[in-house]
Image (tube, rainbow, N blue to C red):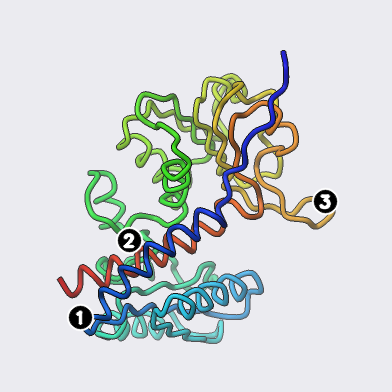
Amino acid sequence: MATMTASIISGKEIGQQVYADLQKEISALRDRGINPGLAVVLVGEDPASQVYVGQKEKKCNELGILSKKILKPDTISEADLLALVDELNADDEVHGVLVQLPLPDHISETKIMAAVSPNKDVDGTHPVNLGMLMMGMGDLWPCTPAGVIEMLDRTGVEIAGKNAVVVGRSNTVGKPCALMLLHRHATVTVCHSKTADLAGVCRSADILVAAVGRAKMITGDMIKPGAVVIDVGINRGEDGKLVGDVDFDAASQVAAAISPVPGGVGPMTIAMLMSNTVAAAKAATA
């Protein structure tokens, strides 16, 4: 069988297209005297979280979105953090509230996520918004899976009628991604650690989304020739470099199109966060 070289689905490039569209929406809001605002709460000094929060703040500044960064020590009590979330829920300048995960062990992430107003939940992880997603309603859906769909759409990939396989069943990526693909009329299979014949199921996929968090777990022989592969994984390889859940070099010889790591889904997650913030501002002022 002749090998093919996959076209690259660049999250950086698609993210720029999303930002160009958002700038028009932000300008229209500003003409009405509305300035979209995002508050990000960072508890403790986790290095990865600091990088993510910095990227979000930078993007807000580039787009003209009001950015409030609130830093709290990891000794903060759960009650005090809940009180802070309540304050932000009541702040009219803030349309989106995001509490950066992970949180210290003594704080319940579930409780904090549920305390954020569903109307300001720009991460799309509030039980109400996940319920809305289940029903195909609302527009504050989880950022990473929303980014996956945006990448497929803007690359011109037809979703309806295709076999889609999602590897991973997390509440933040795997399950919501499966639902989004289902809403778009794909036939969806969700794989996990108990899936029998994972390779065989993956080979049935026209669209394969890898979101399992294990470096290079999806090998080239697990991919159907001509499939579209979206790699959500961000892992450190043995050499310390970032790698995805897919063996990129092998997969790109079989797939028709593939997203790289880094530069794939990562930039899209921040793009969709900005998109959700603008959507929340529009809804709050409609």
Q: CA distance from mark 3 to mark 2?
A: 35 Å
- Residue drawn at 54 percent across, 36 percent down: 167
Question: Where the C terminus falls, by quadrant?
Answer: bottom left
| Residue 89 percent location from the top left of the image | 28, 79
Residue at image mark 2: 126
Q: Amino acid at mark 1?
A: Arg
**Snapshot quadrant of residue 202:** top right
| Residue 143 percent location from the top left of the image | 43, 57
Q: CA distance from mark 1 to mark 3?
A: 52 Å
Q: Amino acid at mark 2?
A: His
Residue at image mark 1: 32
- Residue drawn at 71 percent across, 29 percent down: 253
Q: Earlier in the sequence, mark 1 or mark 2?
A: 1
Residue at image mark 3: 238
* Residue 219 visible (yes or no): no
Q: Earlier in the sequence, mark 1 or mark 3?
A: 1
| Residue 240 percent location from the top left of the image | 80, 57
| Residue 16's disc number | none
